[in-house]
Image (tube, rainbow, N blue to C red):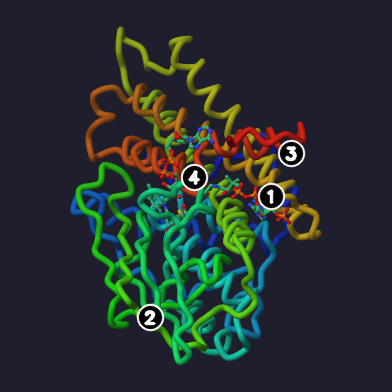
């Protein structure tokens, strides 16, 4: 198979700056050299490729849209999105790692942390020396995190946390967890460090999806954390939801990377696979599938590019992010399914990547707000009526 050239039917490259293209291309090359040769084995063995984290840190891929002052790359949001796209061309698990570290851990520390918390954690998280996770979802509160049962109690010298979080990416490998808990009935963010007595993070095993990513439970049993570990600027669920906006933005870009990998694989395969004495690419039904893939990738690219420009101008609304996450992940999953279909029996083999992407995208469709929750977020924005209950 030839070298991956990207997908750019509408010359969208002409809308990108030289710096944006350079960043995209350097991550693309790194994924080609370091990720693609090892990812399938990691996926099969259900192992996250931890050795890649320092390299990601060195390349400035972690929290890359945050300020240089705290050890971050301070690039714009389009370049940030292009990084997510390229990482997810490798594997959704790798992009998940970067989303959690940057959008769900570094962003809240940067936005609501004390100066001391920022100076300590951000450079270490940016370099990959430390790993973070984000605990919002609970066993009984997924789409409706506002109902959370985890509590923090002020006992004078410390906060005491009790409760459990579920489905937490990076949980078992994290040095620090950003945990959302109710203090006097108000949702606040807390930093819980690995090894704190009363805190454990058992890994969730036997997943069919995101196998090259660590997913865990977080358990707090009279877990005592120092007073200075509260994120002082947090004052309600809205803070946690604002983190989700940052991560969903990256996912909308990332899903395109997975879709591009599948399209590229299906296109190449269809041009070389012979049936009825012809390449299968010559059949109208195969072309119909390939055109659908290209069509949706192209629309998705234009959607996130404008979303990124709006974000850089400070004009992006969270419902616009919901529309992009919803659309791009939905179509990426359809594209992965069609690619697997075109590859037929070979499509289920680990020699090819489309089915791995397909299984991953099932999680991506669910996490960070399910497809249907995003429908309702956009529905509320355009009608003014909430249909959640
Ligand atoms: P609601 O009353 O609608 O909102 C409360 C306040 O928050 C505001 N708001 C947001 N602000 C910023 N960004 C957002 N995305 C926001 N969504 C809402 C809202 O305007 C309101 O502000 P104000 O000033 O009026 O008070 O809150 P609700 O409790 O009714 O919940 C609404 C709902 C369902 C949309 C929300 O809870 C939701 O998004 N549910 C989905 C849960 C979810 O996405 N969980 C993700 C967990 S993290 C994860 O999955 C990581 S995967 C990581 C990886 O591996 O990549
Ligand atoms: P539920 O909320 O129980 O939903 C079940 C079904 O009901 C869905 O189809 C949903 O769309 C539908 N539904 C729910 N409410 C409504 C409604 N009002 N109207 C119509 N339909 C509705 N969470 C974190 O906090 N941190 C993480 O790092 C993290 N990583 C994750 C990694 C993976 C691999 C996965 C799979 C999940 C992760 N999550 C994480 C959790 C994720 O955010 C939740 O799974 C997601 O928000 C959905 O919650 P739920 O699974 O409890 O589904």
Residue where numbered disc 3 is placed: 381
Disc 1 residue lies near ligand 1 with CB under 8 A: yes
Q: Quadrant of residue 238?
A: bottom right
User: Which residue appears at 54% of the width and 71% of the height?
Assistant: 184
Q: Measure the alpha-carbon separation of dots 1 and 3.
A: 10 Å
State whether residue 157 is above or below residue 303.
Answer: below
Residue where numbered disc 1 is placed: 318
Q: Which mark is residue 143?
A: 4
User: Which residue appears at 54% of the width and 44% of the height?
Assistant: 6
Disc 4 residue lies near ligand 2 with CB under 8 A: yes
- For the C terminus, the quadrant is top right
Considering the numbered disc 3 on the image, is that residue within a helix, a strand or a loop? helix
Image check: 310 left or right of 379? right
Considering the numbered disc 2 on the image, is that residue within a helix, a strand or a loop? strand
User: Which residue appears at 60% of the width and 57% of the height?
Assistant: 241
Q: Measure the alpha-carbon separation of dots 2 and 3.
A: 38 Å
Q: Nearer the viewer, mark 1 or mark 3?
A: 3
């Amino acid at each position: 198979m030839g070298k991956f050239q990207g997908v750019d039917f509408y010359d969208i490259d002409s809308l990108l700056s030289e710096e944006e293209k350079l960043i995209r291309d350097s991550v693309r090359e790194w994924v080609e050299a370091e990720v693609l040769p090892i990812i399938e084995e990691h996926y099969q063995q259900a192992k996250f490729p931890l050795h890649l984290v320092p390299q990601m840190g060195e390349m400035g891929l972690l929290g890359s849209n945050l300020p240089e002052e705290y050890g971050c790359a301070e690039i714009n949001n389009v370049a940030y999105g292009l990084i997510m796209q390229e990482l997810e061309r490798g594997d959704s698990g790798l992009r998940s790692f970067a989303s959690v570290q940057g959008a769900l851990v570094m962003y809240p520390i940067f936005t609501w942390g004390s100066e001391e918390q920022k100076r300590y954690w951000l450079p270490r998280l940016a370099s990959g020396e430390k790993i973070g996770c984000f605990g919002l979802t609970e066993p009984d509160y997924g789409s409706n995190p506002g109902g959370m049962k985890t509590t923090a109690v002020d006992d004078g010298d410390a906060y005491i946390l009790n409760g459990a979080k579920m489905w937490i990416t990076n949980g078992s490998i994290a040095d620090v967890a950003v945990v959302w808990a109710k203090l006097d009935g108000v949702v606040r963010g807390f930093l819980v460090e690995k090894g704190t007595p009363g805190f454990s993070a058992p890994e969730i095993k036997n997943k069919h999806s995101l196998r090259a990513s660590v997913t865990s439970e977080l358990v707090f049993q009279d877990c005592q954390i120092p007073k200075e570990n509260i994120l002082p600027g947090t004052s309600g669920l809205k803070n946690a939801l604002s983190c989700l906006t940052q991560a969903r933005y990256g996912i909308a870009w990332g899903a395109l990377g997975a879709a591009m990998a599948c399209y590229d694989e299906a296109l190449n395969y269809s041009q070389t696979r012979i049936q009825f004495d012809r390449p299968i690419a010559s059949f109208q039904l195969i072309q119909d599938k390939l055109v659908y893939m290209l069509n949706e990738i192209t629309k998705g690219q234009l959607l996130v590019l404008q979303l990124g420009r709006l974000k850089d101008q400070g004009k992006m609304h969270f419902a616009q992010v919901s529309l992009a996450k919803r659309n791009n992940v939905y179509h990426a999953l359809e594209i992965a399914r069609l690619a697997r279909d075109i590859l037929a029996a070979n499509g289920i083999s680990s020699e090819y990547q489309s089915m791995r992407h397909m299984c991953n995208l099932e999680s991506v469709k669910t996490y960070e707000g399910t497809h249907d929750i995003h429908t309702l977020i956009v529905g509320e924005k355009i009608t003014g009526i909430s249909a959640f209950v």
